[in-house]
C-alpha cells in the first residue's frame, strides 16, 4: 500500500508546485494556478500553511454570479409565513392517510392483484401490490410534508397547498391523490377515485 502512495505523493508535489516563472508580485495568478492544478488531480486534498492559498479536491470555486434566471428544475420557493402550524399539519396529514387507507382497502376488494396488502403502523401507510411494487406514505412533521415512495414515479414530497386544498409536489405541481389514482389504475387495470 505504501509503495502505491509514494508515486502519488511525488505526482502531487509536481502538479501542485507553482512554476518558477511566476514572480512574487503575481499572487492572484499563483492562487488561480494552484486551484487549477489541484483540480487536474481530483484525488488530492491539501491545505497550505505557507500562504493564503487553500485548495480542496473535487471542489469547484467560482466567483462569477450564478444565472438563476432559468426556471429549469428550480422548485417553487417556500413561503415560511404560510407554513402550517404543527397541529393543523397533523390533522390534515392524518385525515389524508386514514382516508387513503380506507379507500385502498375498498379498492383491494375490487381488484384481482396477488399479494395485495395494506399496512398502517408508526404513522406509515404501506400498500403492497405483489410483484407490481410497493407504495409507502408517511408524514414528515419537521417539513410539514407527506412523503410518497412510488414504484412508478419514485420518491416525492408533498406540501399542503391552501389555495387548492390538496397535497402538492412543488417541483411538478402534481397532486398526491391524482398521482395515486393514475398510477394505481395503470398498475392494477381498474380505476380508483381518491378525491
Image (spheres, helix red, strand yellow):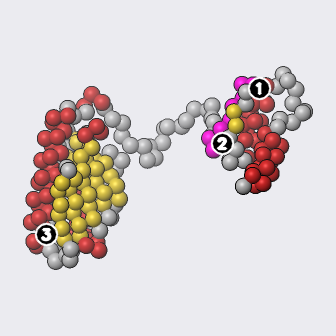
Residue count near mark 1 (Cα–Cα under 10 Å), binned few <14, some 14–19, many ≥20: few
Between the residue at mark 2 and the residue at mark 3, the CA separation in whole angstroms equals 53 Å
Instruction: Decide which of tag 2 and tag 3 comes sooner along the chain.
Output: 2
Identify residue for label 3.
108
Name the mark on residue 1: none
Percent across and percent down for residue 73 are 43, 47
Residue at the spot 33% in from the left edge and 35% down from the top edge? 78
Residue at the spot 63% in from the left edge and 35% down from the top edge? 62
Percent across and percent down for residue 72 are 46, 46
Q: Is residue 97 left or right of residue 150?
A: left
- Our reading of the magenta stretch's main secondary structure is loop
Q: Residue furthest front?
A: 2
Element type at mark 3:
helix
Location of residue 187 (image quadrant):
bottom left
Element type at mark 1:
loop
Identify residue for label 1.
50
Residue count near mark 2 (Cα–Cα under 10 Å), binned few <14, some 14–19, many ≥20: some
Magenta region: which residues? 50-59
Task: Please tell me whether residue 52 belongs to the stretch shown in magenta.
Answer: yes
The reply to whether residue 193 is visible in this rendering is no
Name the mark on residue 57: 2
Amino acid at each position: 500500500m505504501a509503495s502505491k502512495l509514494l508515486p502519488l505523493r511525488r505526482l502531487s508535489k509536481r502538479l501542485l508546485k507553482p512554476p518558477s516563472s511566476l514572480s512574487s508580485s503575481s499572487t492572484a495568478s499563483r492562487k488561480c494556478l494552484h486551484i487549477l492544478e489541484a483540480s487536474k488531480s481530483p484525488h488530492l486534498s491539501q491545505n497550505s500553511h505557507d500562504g493564503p492559498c487553500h485548495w480542496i479536491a473535487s471542489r469547484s470555486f467560482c466567483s462569477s454570479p450564478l444565472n438563476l434566471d432559468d426556471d429549469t428544475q428550480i422548485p417553487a420557493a417556500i413561503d415560511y409565513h404560510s407554513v402550517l402550524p404543527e397541529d393543523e399539519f397533523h390533522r390534515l396529514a392524518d385525515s389524508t392517510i386514514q382516508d387513503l387507507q380506507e379507500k385502498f382497502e375498498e379498492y383491494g376488494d375490487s381488484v384481482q392483484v396477488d399479494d395485495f396488502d395494506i399496512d398502517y403502523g408508526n404513522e406509515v401507510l404501506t400498500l403492497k401490490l405483489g410483484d407490481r411494487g410497493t407504495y409507502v406514505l408517511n408524514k414528515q412533521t419537521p417539513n410539514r410534508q407527506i412523503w410518497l415512495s412510488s414504484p412508478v414515479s419514485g420518491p416525492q414530497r408533498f406540501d399542503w397547498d391552501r389555495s387548492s386544498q390538496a397535497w402538492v409536489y412543488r417541483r411538478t405541481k402534481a397532486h398526491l391523490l391524482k398521482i395515486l389514482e393514475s398510477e394505481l389504475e395503470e398498475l392494477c387495470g381498474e380505476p380508483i377515485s381518491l378525491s
